[in-house]
Image: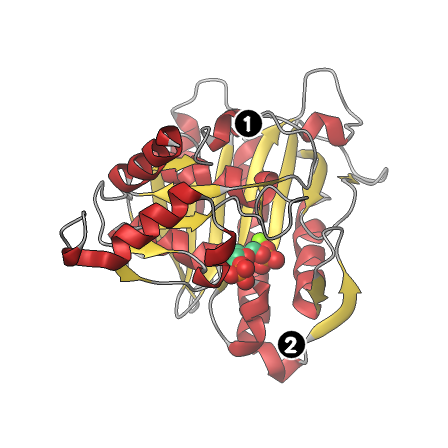
Amino acid sequence: MYIGTTVTQFIIEEQRKLSNASGDFTSLLNDIVTACKVISNTVDQGALIGVLGSAGSENVQGETQKKLDLITNDVVIKSNEWAGHLAAMASEEMDDIYPIPEQFPKGKYLLVFDPLDGSSNIDVNISVGTIFSILRCPDGISNPTAEDFLQEGTKQVCAGFALYGPSTLMVLTTGNGVNGFTLDKNIGEFVLTYPEMKVPEDTNEFAINASNDRFWEEPVKRYVDECLAGDTGPRGRNFNMRWVASMVAEVYRILTRGGIFMYPKDTKDPSKAGKLRLMYEANPMSFIIEQAGGVSHTGRERIMDIKPTDLHQRVPVILGSKNEVDRLVSYHKDQ
Ligand code: AHM
Ligand code: MG
Protein backbone atom coordinates (compact mmCIF):
# COMPACT_ATOMS: atom_id res chain seq x y z
CA MET A 1 0.00 0.00 0.00
CA TYR A 2 1.27 3.51 -0.87
CA ILE A 3 1.16 5.83 2.13
CA GLY A 4 1.89 9.01 0.16
CA THR A 5 4.90 11.34 0.34
CA THR A 6 6.33 11.47 3.83
CA VAL A 7 7.98 14.66 5.03
CA THR A 8 11.37 12.88 4.99
CA GLN A 9 10.93 11.81 1.37
CA PHE A 10 9.75 15.30 0.48
CA ILE A 11 12.79 16.96 2.06
CA ILE A 12 15.23 14.52 0.43
CA GLU A 13 13.67 15.13 -2.98
CA GLU A 14 13.82 18.92 -2.44
CA GLN A 15 17.48 18.71 -1.46
CA ARG A 16 18.38 16.58 -4.48
CA LYS A 17 17.45 19.57 -6.65
CA LEU A 18 20.36 21.46 -5.03
CA SER A 19 23.63 20.19 -6.43
CA ASN A 20 25.70 21.16 -3.37
CA ALA A 21 23.41 19.70 -0.67
CA SER A 22 25.37 17.58 1.83
CA GLY A 23 22.45 15.84 3.51
CA ASP A 24 23.07 17.72 6.78
CA PHE A 25 20.01 19.86 6.31
CA THR A 26 17.75 16.86 5.61
CA SER A 27 19.01 15.19 8.72
CA LEU A 28 18.49 18.34 10.81
CA LEU A 29 14.92 18.66 9.61
CA ASN A 30 14.33 15.02 10.49
CA ASP A 31 15.41 15.70 14.06
CA ILE A 32 13.04 18.68 14.26
CA VAL A 33 10.24 16.50 12.89
CA THR A 34 11.00 13.90 15.57
CA ALA A 35 10.81 16.59 18.28
CA CYS A 36 7.41 17.70 16.96
CA LYS A 37 6.11 14.12 17.05
CA VAL A 38 7.22 13.78 20.67
CA ILE A 39 5.60 17.12 21.55
CA SER A 40 2.40 16.13 19.74
CA ASN A 41 2.22 12.97 21.82
CA THR A 42 2.94 14.83 25.07
CA VAL A 43 0.31 17.52 24.37
CA ASP A 44 -2.14 14.78 23.41
CA GLN A 45 -1.69 12.98 26.74
CA GLY A 46 -2.14 16.23 28.73
CA ALA A 47 -3.63 15.70 32.17
CA LEU A 48 -3.13 11.92 31.92
CA ILE A 49 0.60 12.41 32.37
CA GLY A 50 0.38 15.48 34.61
CA VAL A 51 1.94 17.99 32.20
CA LEU A 52 -0.69 20.76 32.33
CA GLY A 53 -0.56 23.88 34.52
CA SER A 54 2.02 26.45 35.49
CA ALA A 55 5.69 25.72 36.14
CA GLY A 56 5.85 28.56 38.66
CA SER A 57 8.67 30.32 36.77
CA GLU A 58 8.97 33.27 34.37
CA ASN A 59 10.81 33.53 31.05
CA VAL A 60 13.11 36.38 30.05
CA GLN A 61 10.10 38.37 28.82
CA GLY A 62 8.48 38.18 32.29
CA GLU A 63 5.78 35.73 31.16
CA THR A 64 4.69 32.89 33.42
CA GLN A 65 5.94 29.60 32.04
CA LYS A 66 3.73 26.56 31.74
CA LYS A 67 5.10 23.13 32.61
CA LEU A 68 4.74 22.29 28.94
CA ASP A 69 6.80 25.35 27.89
CA LEU A 70 9.75 23.85 29.75
CA ILE A 71 9.11 20.21 28.79
CA THR A 72 8.78 21.02 25.08
CA ASN A 73 11.85 23.29 25.18
CA ASP A 74 13.80 20.34 26.52
CA VAL A 75 12.40 17.99 23.86
CA VAL A 76 13.59 20.29 21.06
CA ILE A 77 17.04 20.63 22.62
CA LYS A 78 17.53 16.92 23.30
CA SER A 79 16.36 15.95 19.80
CA ASN A 80 18.70 18.40 18.08
CA GLU A 81 21.88 18.78 20.14
CA TRP A 82 23.57 15.44 19.40
CA ALA A 83 23.64 14.99 15.63
CA GLY A 84 26.31 17.48 14.60
CA HIS A 85 24.21 19.74 12.35
CA LEU A 86 23.92 22.71 14.71
CA ALA A 87 26.37 25.17 16.21
CA ALA A 88 23.83 26.59 18.70
CA MET A 89 20.13 27.07 19.40
CA ALA A 90 18.01 29.94 20.70
CA SER A 91 14.55 29.61 22.21
CA GLU A 92 11.79 31.94 23.31
CA GLU A 93 11.91 30.13 26.65
CA MET A 94 15.65 30.59 27.35
CA ASP A 95 17.34 33.86 28.31
CA ASP A 96 20.57 33.06 26.47
CA ILE A 97 21.55 31.00 23.47
CA TYR A 98 22.21 27.28 23.92
CA PRO A 99 25.65 26.36 22.57
CA ILE A 100 26.01 22.73 21.49
CA PRO A 101 27.66 20.93 24.45
CA GLU A 102 31.33 19.98 24.12
CA GLN A 103 30.70 16.21 23.87
CA PHE A 104 28.82 16.63 20.57
CA PRO A 105 30.14 17.58 17.12
CA LYS A 106 29.18 21.07 15.88
CA GLY A 107 27.55 21.90 12.58
CA LYS A 108 26.87 24.81 10.25
CA TYR A 109 23.31 25.74 11.20
CA LEU A 110 21.59 27.70 13.95
CA LEU A 111 18.15 26.68 15.19
CA VAL A 112 15.71 29.26 16.55
CA PHE A 113 12.40 28.11 18.05
CA ASP A 114 9.31 28.75 20.09
CA PRO A 115 8.69 25.28 21.55
CA LEU A 116 5.02 25.82 22.43
CA ASP A 117 3.39 28.82 20.83
CA GLY A 118 -0.02 29.76 22.23
CA SER A 119 0.75 27.99 25.50
CA SER A 120 -1.77 30.16 27.39
CA ASN A 121 -4.29 27.92 25.59
CA ILE A 122 -2.88 24.62 26.73
CA ASP A 123 -5.01 24.19 29.87
CA VAL A 124 -8.22 24.90 27.93
CA ASN A 125 -7.45 22.35 25.19
CA ILE A 126 -7.15 24.83 22.32
CA SER A 127 -4.60 24.34 19.53
CA VAL A 128 -0.95 25.13 20.21
CA GLY A 129 2.17 24.62 18.10
CA THR A 130 5.94 24.67 17.69
CA ILE A 131 7.55 27.33 15.46
CA PHE A 132 11.10 27.04 14.12
CA SER A 133 13.56 28.82 11.87
CA ILE A 134 16.93 27.65 10.55
CA LEU A 135 19.78 30.07 9.88
CA ARG A 136 23.32 29.48 8.70
CA CYS A 137 26.06 29.92 11.28
CA PRO A 138 28.30 32.70 9.89
CA ASP A 139 31.39 31.40 8.04
CA GLY A 140 34.39 30.61 10.18
CA ILE A 141 32.45 30.66 13.45
CA SER A 142 32.25 27.47 15.47
CA ASN A 143 31.33 29.00 18.83
CA PRO A 144 28.54 31.41 17.93
CA THR A 145 27.32 34.15 20.25
CA ALA A 146 23.86 35.75 20.38
CA GLU A 147 25.14 38.32 17.83
CA ASP A 148 25.52 35.58 15.22
CA PHE A 149 21.78 34.88 15.42
CA LEU A 150 20.85 38.49 14.65
CA GLN A 151 20.26 37.92 10.94
CA GLU A 152 17.43 39.37 8.84
CA GLY A 153 14.47 37.08 8.13
CA THR A 154 15.50 37.03 4.47
CA LYS A 155 18.52 34.94 5.52
CA GLN A 156 16.40 32.03 6.81
CA VAL A 157 17.22 28.70 5.16
CA CYS A 158 13.98 27.13 6.31
CA ALA A 159 11.00 27.93 8.49
CA GLY A 160 8.13 25.83 9.68
CA PHE A 161 5.63 25.11 12.36
CA ALA A 162 3.78 22.16 13.80
CA LEU A 163 0.18 22.66 14.83
CA TYR A 164 -1.24 20.40 17.55
CA GLY A 165 -4.97 20.62 16.88
CA PRO A 166 -7.67 18.10 15.92
CA SER A 167 -4.94 16.80 13.57
CA THR A 168 -1.22 17.34 14.06
CA LEU A 169 0.12 19.24 11.06
CA MET A 170 3.54 20.37 9.86
CA VAL A 171 3.93 23.36 7.54
CA LEU A 172 7.32 23.92 5.92
CA THR A 173 9.15 26.23 3.56
CA THR A 174 12.72 26.10 2.33
CA GLY A 175 12.15 29.10 0.06
CA ASN A 176 10.47 27.11 -2.67
CA GLY A 177 6.79 27.41 -1.77
CA VAL A 178 4.91 26.08 1.25
CA ASN A 179 3.80 22.52 1.87
CA GLY A 180 1.61 21.03 4.59
CA PHE A 181 1.79 17.53 6.09
CA THR A 182 -0.60 15.65 8.39
CA LEU A 183 0.74 13.31 11.08
CA ASP A 184 -0.59 9.81 10.52
CA LYS A 185 -0.41 8.64 14.13
CA ASN A 186 -0.82 4.98 13.10
CA ILE A 187 2.46 4.94 11.21
CA GLY A 188 4.18 7.86 12.96
CA GLU A 189 4.86 9.81 9.77
CA PHE A 190 3.92 13.27 8.52
CA VAL A 191 2.36 12.73 5.09
CA LEU A 192 2.05 15.44 2.42
CA THR A 193 -1.62 16.46 2.41
CA TYR A 194 -1.51 20.15 1.45
CA PRO A 195 0.96 20.66 -1.42
CA GLU A 196 1.81 24.19 -2.57
CA MET A 197 -0.30 26.12 -0.10
CA LYS A 198 -1.38 29.60 -1.27
CA VAL A 199 -2.88 32.48 0.70
CA PRO A 200 -5.86 33.90 -1.22
CA GLU A 201 -5.22 37.58 -2.09
CA ASP A 202 -8.61 38.71 -0.82
CA THR A 203 -10.41 37.90 2.39
CA ASN A 204 -13.46 38.77 4.48
CA GLU A 205 -11.87 37.66 7.74
CA PHE A 206 -9.68 39.53 10.20
CA ALA A 207 -8.00 38.48 13.45
CA ILE A 208 -6.99 40.85 16.23
CA ASN A 209 -7.26 40.93 20.02
CA ALA A 210 -9.97 43.61 20.18
CA SER A 211 -9.50 44.10 23.93
CA ASN A 212 -6.46 46.21 23.00
CA ASP A 213 -8.58 48.59 20.89
CA ARG A 214 -7.92 51.63 23.07
CA PHE A 215 -4.15 51.19 22.70
CA TRP A 216 -4.07 50.90 18.88
CA GLU A 217 -2.64 53.47 16.53
CA GLU A 218 -4.93 55.40 14.19
CA PRO A 219 -4.35 53.30 11.01
CA VAL A 220 -5.29 50.06 12.82
CA LYS A 221 -8.37 51.70 14.40
CA ARG A 222 -9.45 52.95 10.99
CA TYR A 223 -8.92 49.55 9.34
CA VAL A 224 -10.81 47.61 12.02
CA ASP A 225 -13.64 50.20 12.21
CA GLU A 226 -14.11 49.91 8.46
CA CYS A 227 -14.26 46.09 8.69
CA LEU A 228 -16.77 46.31 11.55
CA ALA A 229 -18.95 48.74 9.61
CA GLY A 230 -19.33 46.01 6.98
CA ASP A 231 -21.73 46.75 4.13
CA THR A 232 -22.82 49.97 5.84
CA GLY A 233 -19.28 51.41 5.67
CA PRO A 234 -16.64 52.32 3.07
CA ARG A 235 -15.71 48.67 2.44
CA GLY A 236 -19.26 47.90 1.26
CA ARG A 237 -19.10 44.28 2.42
CA ASN A 238 -19.29 42.33 5.66
CA PHE A 239 -16.29 40.90 7.52
CA ASN A 240 -15.98 38.05 9.98
CA MET A 241 -13.65 38.12 13.00
CA ARG A 242 -11.59 35.36 14.69
CA TRP A 243 -9.07 35.36 17.54
CA VAL A 244 -7.66 32.02 18.70
CA ALA A 245 -4.72 33.53 20.66
CA SER A 246 -2.48 30.86 19.09
CA MET A 247 -0.54 32.38 16.20
CA VAL A 248 0.10 28.91 14.76
CA ALA A 249 -3.65 28.29 14.47
CA GLU A 250 -4.29 31.75 12.97
CA VAL A 251 -1.51 31.39 10.39
CA TYR A 252 -2.73 27.93 9.44
CA ARG A 253 -6.26 29.28 8.95
CA ILE A 254 -4.89 32.07 6.75
CA LEU A 255 -2.89 29.57 4.68
CA THR A 256 -6.07 27.58 4.21
CA ARG A 257 -8.77 30.17 3.52
CA GLY A 258 -7.10 33.59 3.70
CA GLY A 259 -7.40 36.34 6.28
CA ILE A 260 -5.43 39.10 7.95
CA PHE A 261 -3.74 38.61 11.33
CA MET A 262 -2.75 41.64 13.36
CA TYR A 263 -0.76 42.04 16.57
CA PRO A 264 0.07 45.67 15.84
CA LYS A 265 2.14 48.28 17.60
CA ASP A 266 0.17 49.69 20.52
CA THR A 267 0.64 51.97 23.51
CA LYS A 268 -0.18 49.34 26.15
CA ASP A 269 3.45 49.08 27.24
CA PRO A 270 5.57 51.75 25.55
CA SER A 271 8.75 49.74 26.24
CA LYS A 272 7.53 47.03 23.84
CA ALA A 273 7.24 47.54 20.08
CA GLY A 274 4.62 44.78 19.84
CA LYS A 275 3.83 41.49 21.52
CA LEU A 276 5.27 38.92 19.15
CA ARG A 277 8.93 38.05 18.95
CA LEU A 278 10.85 38.77 15.76
CA MET A 279 13.18 35.77 15.84
CA TYR A 280 10.86 33.06 17.18
CA GLU A 281 7.49 34.02 15.71
CA ALA A 282 7.44 36.93 13.26
CA ASN A 283 10.33 35.93 10.98
CA PRO A 284 9.46 32.24 10.50
CA MET A 285 5.77 33.03 9.97
CA SER A 286 6.67 35.86 7.56
CA PHE A 287 8.84 33.50 5.48
CA ILE A 288 5.95 31.01 5.28
CA ILE A 289 3.32 33.63 4.49
CA GLU A 290 5.44 35.32 1.80
CA GLN A 291 6.30 31.96 0.23
CA ALA A 292 2.56 31.27 0.05
CA GLY A 293 1.94 34.57 -1.76
CA GLY A 294 0.88 36.63 1.25
CA VAL A 295 2.43 39.75 2.79
CA SER A 296 3.99 40.25 6.22
CA HIS A 297 4.70 43.73 7.52
CA THR A 298 4.91 45.85 10.65
CA GLY A 299 2.84 48.60 8.99
CA ARG A 300 6.06 50.55 8.40
CA GLU A 301 8.46 47.94 7.01
CA ARG A 302 8.63 44.40 5.69
CA ILE A 303 9.26 42.16 8.69
CA MET A 304 11.92 40.02 6.97
CA ASP A 305 13.99 43.15 6.20
CA ILE A 306 14.37 44.12 9.87
CA LYS A 307 17.96 43.87 11.11
CA PRO A 308 17.50 42.28 14.53
CA THR A 309 19.14 44.06 17.46
CA ASP A 310 18.18 41.64 20.22
CA LEU A 311 17.43 37.93 20.41
CA HIS A 312 14.14 38.53 22.22
CA GLN A 313 13.13 41.66 20.28
CA ARG A 314 9.40 42.22 19.72
CA VAL A 315 7.82 43.65 16.59
CA PRO A 316 4.36 44.62 15.36
CA VAL A 317 2.94 41.93 13.05
CA ILE A 318 0.41 42.36 10.25
CA LEU A 319 0.28 39.38 7.92
CA GLY A 320 -1.93 37.47 5.53
CA SER A 321 -3.92 38.11 2.38
CA LYS A 322 -2.06 40.53 0.14
CA ASN A 323 -4.79 43.04 -0.65
CA GLU A 324 -5.84 43.51 2.99
CA VAL A 325 -2.29 43.82 4.35
CA ASP A 326 -1.42 46.26 1.55
CA ARG A 327 -4.49 48.33 2.46
CA LEU A 328 -3.52 48.54 6.13
CA VAL A 329 0.07 49.40 5.19
CA SER A 330 -1.27 52.20 2.96
CA TYR A 331 -3.26 53.57 5.95
CA HIS A 332 0.06 53.79 7.85
CA LYS A 333 1.48 55.85 4.96
CA ASP A 334 -1.54 58.19 5.00
CA GLN A 335 -0.88 59.01 8.64
P1 AHM B 1 3.36 32.69 23.50
O1 AHM B 1 4.50 32.37 22.57
O2 AHM B 1 3.83 33.03 24.88
O3 AHM B 1 2.29 31.66 23.49
O4 AHM B 1 2.71 34.10 22.99
C1 AHM B 1 2.38 34.25 21.63
C2 AHM B 1 0.88 34.19 21.44
C3 AHM B 1 0.50 34.08 20.00
O5 AHM B 1 0.42 32.73 19.61
C4 AHM B 1 -0.84 34.76 19.96
O6 AHM B 1 -1.13 35.31 18.69
C5 AHM B 1 -0.70 35.84 21.00
O7 AHM B 1 0.34 35.41 21.88
C6 AHM B 1 -1.96 36.04 21.78
O8 AHM B 1 -1.80 37.10 22.64
P2 AHM B 1 -3.00 37.68 23.54
O9 AHM B 1 -3.17 36.69 24.66
O10 AHM B 1 -2.48 39.01 23.99
O11 AHM B 1 -4.22 37.80 22.69
MG1 MG C 1 4.98 32.11 20.88
Q: Quadrant of the N terminus?
A: bottom left
Residue positioned 50% across, 35% down in the render = 158
Instruction: Give the quadrant of ligand 1.
Output: bottom right
User: Quick check: 82 above or below 165?
Assistant: above
Q: Which of the two marks, 1 or 2, is nearer to us in this view?
A: 1
Residue positioned 41% across, 30% down in the render = 175
**Picture disc at residue 306:** 1
Q: Decide which of 292, 214 is in the foreground and name it.
A: 214
- Kindly state the secondary structure of the residue where label 1 is placed: loop
Distance from the alpha carbon under mark 1 to that under mark 2: 36 Å
Residue positioned 67% across, 46% down in the render = 80
Q: Which residue is mark 2?
A: 52
Q: Is residue 156 left or right of residue 110?
A: left
Label 1 neighbour load within 10 Å: few <14, some 14-19, many 20+: some
Q: Position of residue 17 (x, y in %)?
A: 38, 24
**Picture disc at residue 97:** none
On the question of residue 6 being in view, the answer is no
Q: Position of residue 204 (x, y in %)?
A: 22, 53
Instruction: State how the image is colored.
Output: secondary structure
Report if the beta carbon of the residue with label 2 is closer than 8 angstroms to ligand 1.
no
